[in-house]
Amino acid sequence: MSPGLFVALEALKGLGRVLTRWGAWAASIAVVLLAGTAVIVLPTRDEDHTARTVFYLVASADAAVGESSLNRLAWDIWSWPGVSAVTFRFPGETEPQEIAQRSLVVRVRDPEVQRQVGIRLEQFGELTSIDHIQLTTSPPPRLPATSRVLALVGLVLALPLCLWLARWAARGLGAAWGEELALLRYSGASELLLRVPFWLFGALAGLAGAVLYAACFWGVWSWAQEVPAVRQAVPTFVTGGTVATVLGFLLGLALGLVGATVGFPARRHA
Amino acid sequence: MDISLQVSELRFATDDGVVVLDQVSFGVLREGVAVVVGPPSSGKTLLLRLILRELPSTGGQILLLGRNVARLSPRKVAVLRRKVGYLPEEPVVLRSRTVRGNLEFKLKALGLADEDAEDRIARALELSELVHDVERPASELSALETRKLALGLALVTDPPLLLCDDPVRNLAAPEAQAMIDLLMHLQRAGIALVITTREAHVAAQIRARCGESTPVVHLRQEVMA
């Protein structure tokens, strides 16, 4: 067995004596990761929640009209002033209304344009009927941007707390393993060898924090799948779960190793 | 004539300019002894730490086992460091382990748990007079026995040179005498010794037993600003 592995395994036997500190550190890593995730998925700015009215004309085409003719007509209409878009609809479609036969859906800027475009469309013999439609829609409720600010504040508070807990936990391990540490130092063991148990301690805390984070993340994710309001409120949350988990483990490990490096009880020069 | 340690015109000053050691010179032959005497805070422990290159000196030269420690890379210092036994002022032992467990821990941690490990342990136990205490927990050892175990830990790597930092401190007179007898036994077994002490009579006794040629270095109490 290599000296590093031996020292690491021996040090881990002392983990039981600092389990509370280690657990608190792991939990703080999970909090940092959750706060970081919230900062990423929550909206960066407030969106306009006022209702919007959209104006359409649905022009049904005669069954005898060829595909190319209808296509030319659509391009022609799109060039008219005030027309925002022209799209095709086929029987059976339901947007913006039930479609019974091939149709052109013309979206226009405002009611006046809708009226003028309607008059012009009536002059085309290929079109059998023209319906004027006005749809008012309300955007789904989104979480306010202040929620992201709160998450950011949480992250800013959690990160130093995490480092402090890392120092506290590493000091605990240093105290629990103080005799071994002192003996190794007096024996001329390298600082690298002395740090090995602390890095292992930190890596385990980081991985435990990442597991805690992943459990929380996927728990909320599963719940969000069942609640449409949550999906609408935080649409970015429903994607990227796997990436978030992988990143969570990598960042958790990094936080654990950084914490162990920061918390390592350096030799005091008397 | 082999020289284990040669300290020449050693000087150490703190960052504040306080001179703690100045013009300290002495040598220790192979299987020889040197005694460093000084009151508390005179730099005895500091001298040993300078020898072990735990701190850089601010002047002078230290040749340890033929190597100038100031010119060695940290890696080479670590290698050299393992060839030197160190008995700290406060004995450091693993109280939750047995005497053997202590020695095995050190050998395994230093990657020396090879086929010679049992021989190393047996020799260390014999030299430190702990042969009959091998399975006793360190927590049950007396003050003298604990110091012997610390000595065994220092000797388990078969060092040719042993640095002893005030080995009789806080020991009652009979125990202190037993410790001095043990150190003299080590010297006769071929281990060079550097012994620091705050007791002038300890230095005198060691000199009397090892010969008038034994160097005794006196450190001064006051430091120079």
Image: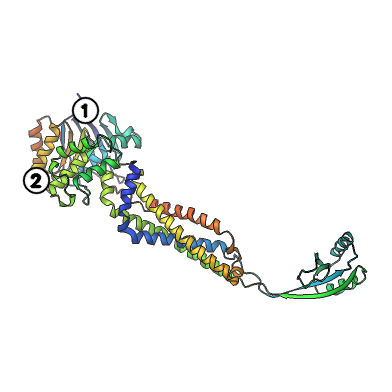
Quadrant containing the N terminus of chain A is top left
Q: Give the quarter of the image for residue B164.
A: top left
Q: Give the number of callouts.
A: 2
Q: Give the quarter of the image for residue A242.
A: bottom right
Snapshot colouring: rainbow
The spot of residue A68 in percent (x, y) is: 88, 59
Q: Secondary structure at mark 2?
A: helix
Q: Gap in Å between the C-alphas at discs 1 and 2?
A: 31 Å
The subunit carrying tag 1 is B
Tell me which residue sits at (48%, 65%) in the image.
A154
Write down the residue under mark 1: B3
Above or below, comparing residue B51 to residue A82 in the picture: above
Amino acid at circle 1: Ile
The subunit carrying tag 2 is B
The spot of residue A227 in percent (x, y) is: 58, 71
Write down the residue under mark 2: B175
Q: Dot 1: within a 10 Å radius of its alpha carbon, few (fewer than 14), some, or many (20 or more) residues?
A: some
Q: Give the quarter of the image for residue B55.
A: top left
Q: Earlier in the sequence, mark 1 or mark 2?
A: 1
- Looking at the image, residue A226 sits to the left or right of residue B175; the answer is right
Q: Secondary structure at mark 1?
A: strand
Tell me which residue sits at (31%, 53%) in the image.
A13
In front: label 1 or label 2: 2
The spot of residue A267 in percent (x, y) is: 31, 48
Tell me which residue sits at (51%, 57%) in the image.
A245
Q: Dot 2: within a 10 Å radius of its alpha carbon, few (fewer than 14), some, or many (20 or more) residues?
A: some
Q: Is residue B36 visible?
A: no
